[in-house]
Image (cartoon, grey):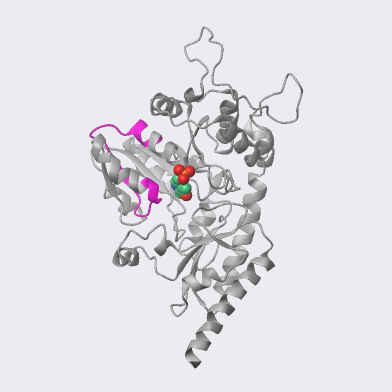
Amino acid sequence: MKRKNLGVNTICTHVGEVKDEQFKGAISPLYMSSSYAYEDVAVKRYPRYFNTPNQEALCKKIAMLEHTENALIFGSGMAAVSTAMLAFLHKGDHVVLPQTLYGGTYNFVVEEFGKFGIEYDFAEGFTEADFTSKIKENTKVIYVETPSNPLMLLTDLQMIANIAKPRGIITMIDNTFASPINQIPAQFGIDVILHSATKYMGGHSDICAGAVAASEEHIQTIWNIAKNLGGSLSDYTVWLLERSMKTMKLRVKAQNRNAKRMAKWLEAHSLVQQVYYPGLKSHPDHALAKRQMMGYTGMLSFELVPSIDTKKFMDALNLIKPSMSLAGVESTILSPAKTSHSLLSAEERGKQGISDGLLRFSVGIEEKKDLIADFERAFAAVTSEKLQTEQA
Ligand SMILES: *Cc1c(COP(=O)(O)O)cnc(C)c1O
């Protein structure tokens, strides 16, 4: 099937489905077999070779959504990230990474790269000079993550590709926060696209998975090491992920719309100091977001005025659940200072713009009026309590 003939919802619903020749069922049958008859071919079918019927089928869907030739599915987002990095970075090579990085990826780099003799530097900001000033003779990869977590700062993908291409550097992006519904990095010349499919691809907070999309040549390079590292995903979860992805565009569009409405509502609230959402005109990267994204995602963060106790505020929420992960159809909230960034010193958090009053909000598909009612209840709870203590 050719992409140019199909719309995104059609790709999500149909591309790559496994044909049920035996019973003519409407959806892909699930092949749990870990043993297949051997044929006279170089590569045998085996789950850890990433080539079972369900894996191959879902890879076609992901590749078509990301405008790449091929894809691979992994047991977690970190399996995808670590395998892809180790595929291109060898002993003595150097990688430039962004200043803000998903915690697991940061840990992988600082805890493991030394053992492999891989060198790295973090860019100090998001401008061209921030990246070029870190490039060395032996730089093999530039890795980016846009929008960033939790302040939703953007990196210009065209700029990154323009820096990398003439120098023969491979570019990689963690596209998890955007999803292929909101951002197609391959259109800007980014080489390797990574996902924690645990987030928007799965979308129901019940799957842990990862994905890599790239050219046939790059996927071959990644596969060569992937089969040795062994981070493949169970076919049962592959099948569940295929089911989830059928509604990905519907879900993500609804989350985009809700997030934009909630960002505007929060921005107008007197107890909210700042809202970080690329869809707001007040966001420093709004113009870039319009250029390189088709939607502004369901992720935002906001800062309460300092007089509010964020824990009490979160405890007073009913519908919006305090939760570590993100991108499910249910709205969740977390305090970066108390969770993802809790190991940093207060000073380091301050440098990264993460205050104690900052909350990251993963907007679900609930009705806007119910989300607003929930926030209003929490604002009322923290302000009435404050009045009581002032009176006492
Ligand atoms: C969750 C996440 C990951 C890691 O994915 P896992 O599925 O938890 O291994 C990587 N990058 C980003 C941006 C994430 O949000």
- As drawn, the residue found furthest toward the front would be 392
Tell me if residue 257 comes above or below residue 247 in the rendering: below
Q: Position of residue 234 (x, y in %)?
A: 54, 31
**Which of 217/321 is in front?**
321
Q: Bounds of the magenta span?
A: 84-105
Which residue is at a point 56% across and 23% down the rendered structure image? 52
User: Does residue 103 belong to the magenta stretch?
Assistant: yes
Q: From what the image shows, is residue 151 above or below residue 175?
A: below
Residue 80: image x %, image y %? 44, 37
In this picture, residue 88 sits left or right of residue 319? left
Residue 58 location, x and y as percent?
59, 31
Q: Who's the residue at 65% across and 36% down the image? A: 11
At horizontal 65% and vertical 56% (from top left) the residue drawn is 365
Front residue of this view, candidates 158 and 119: 119
6 relative position to 59: left or right? right
- In the rendered structure, the answer to whether residue 141 lies left or right of residue 195 reads left
Q: How many marks?
A: 0
Out of 101 and 260, give the one closest to the viewer. Answer: 101
- Where 206 sits versus 20, above or below? below
Residue 361 in view (yes/no): no
Q: Residue furthest bottom?
A: 391
Query: Splitting the image into 4 quarters, where does residue 190 fall?
Result: top left
Where residue 134 sits in the image (x, y, percent)? 27, 48
Q: In the rendered image, which quarter contains the N terminus?
A: top right
Which residue corresponds to the image point at 52% horizontal and 29% vertical from the top-left?
70
Residue 136 is one of the magenta-drawn residues: no
Depicted 71 relative to depicted 296: above or below: above
Q: Is residue 195 visible?
A: yes
